[in-house]
Amino acid sequence: MIDTAGPATRPPARSAAASRPRLRPAPAEPLAAAARRRRRSARARSAAADLLGVLAWISAAVAVLLWLVTPSSREVTGVGSVLTDAGIVAGLIGTDLTLVMLVLAARVPLIDRVFGQDNAIAVHRSLGKPVLYLLLAHGALLTLGYSAESANSPVAETIALFSTPDMPLAYLALGLFLVVVVSSLVAVRRRLPYEVWHVIHLLSYAAVLVALPHMLSVGGVLSAGSWQRTYWIALYVLALGLIALYRFVLPVVVTFRHRIRVTAVEPIAPGVVSIHLAGRSLDRLGVEGGQYGVWRFWTARTWWHAHPVSFSAVPGSAHARITVRDLGAGSARLGRISPGAFVSLEGPYGLFTSRARTAPYLALVASGIGITPVRALLEDTDLRPGEATVLLRGSDGDQQYLWDETAGLANATGSALYAMVGHRAHSRESWMTEEDVRRGVTLRTVFPRLLESDLYVCGPRVWSDLVVREARLAGVPEHQIHQERFE
């Protein structure tokens, strides 16, 4: 049931290992002026996103254009050459988009600041099937084209292609791409342990590498000394270089520079622990409230599993904290880590921060372990009294993780805080309790200035999707909705 009595007054938790909320003085900038500044920042970010999208498509267009201006592309002599040319174009576009996919997954800071890592990965996933179809079309059209020109059957032509240098590698690359895409289908992925799926997904790097030799040696499309060859080598160097830098080199540098170790594992609810960390100059990580990192704990039982987990407090110079719920075998092991364990970090990542704000007011909605980025966001945001309203949602008393700390932050910033406790309604699909549904509670009644607010929502996927759906129906503009998912 929602508590509408006013801002919560409970003090923050005071366990020995808990960190004191870091508060900033109230800013002098008026709300309207701050909103105008945020809108300008949002427009700049949107323009940058459009530019990056255009550049991605231009890269494919340039690849095709460079081939079209070569003499061989104008030698159309029949059906066979038409099929062959169509196969070449499909392969060029498919390979270019494959490199785009790898860059989107490389955790490049610029892409994270513009799109947010979750949105970048969503685009990465959406390209998977189209890229596979283009690569399958590439192989099929070339085989049919060569078959028509040589008067061989498609089967005989396929056998002949296998005897061509580097072509077995091309078929291997296509098979690897097929395995990666099929394993990423929702129905298949849910049946696979995360670790198995992740290892399979790493095959995409191998597929890109083993496909390169046939591009450079077969068919003369990328002949030595041509602009095409130079262009494609540059694309490969750029994509693989970004992956090497941001997925491997930089995380190693960050890890050894800050030397993060576990200092304590604090149970805060059944199946939920806060992991307290110590290190050097952790405030120089540049963490903003609401962001997450990809953590790897170097113990015998956990070293092989990386965990994307939000910071549940803004790091200080020598300490940081994350809060983890037992959502499977991997996360359950984190609750049994011994103090002193060495920790590596990739990040921070995410746009679930005050930097993404565009509106004068702030509405925060969190359920379950979704409280972690919301609590850190509230801690790290300059607020005037009455600017922010927080709604905490839990199925029962056991799900009130970090609520005391959040209440303390709300009190200190003059923010309203409400709680809604109880199982979801059964009479209709809703993110609220049955009692609140019957009372006519809506987002508009909880947040009277909803349309003038940035709405931040974090919690289980189905639940948070229902909150976002109601916000859209209420008329909240899309750029004012910020959703963080833990799936």
Image (spheres, rainbow, N blue to C red):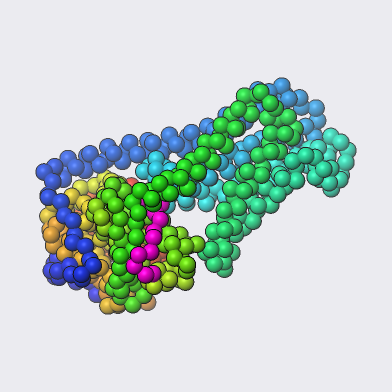
Q: Quadrant of residue 200?
A: bottom right
Residue in the foreground of this view, choosing between 451 and 337: 337
Q: Quadrant of residue 182?
A: bottom right
Q: Is residue 348 magenta?
A: yes
- For residue 346, above or below residue 186: above
Does residue 78 appear in the picture of this structure?
A: yes
Q: Which residue is painted at 14% across and 57% down in the image?
A: 413
Q: Is residue 177 magenta?
A: no
Which of the pair 421/256 is nearer the observer? 256
In this rendering, the answer to whether 255 lies above or below 324 is above
The reply, left or right, for residue 256 in relation to residue 360 is right
Judge whether 244 appears above or below 73 on screen.
Answer: below
The x, y position of residue 305, in whole percent, is: 48, 62
Rendered residue at 47%/67% (across/down) = 300
Q: Residue at x 55, y 35 (%)?
A: 237
- Magenta-highlighted residues: 337-353
| Residue 372 visible, this angle | no
**Vertical order, 293 against 80 (above or below):** below
Whole-percent x and y of residue 264?
30, 68
Quadrant location of the N terminus?
Answer: bottom left
Q: In the image, 121: left or right of 40? A: right
The one of 32 and 369 positioned closer to us in this rendering: 369
Counting the numbered discs, the total is 0
Q: Position of residue 221 (x, y in %)?
A: 70, 30
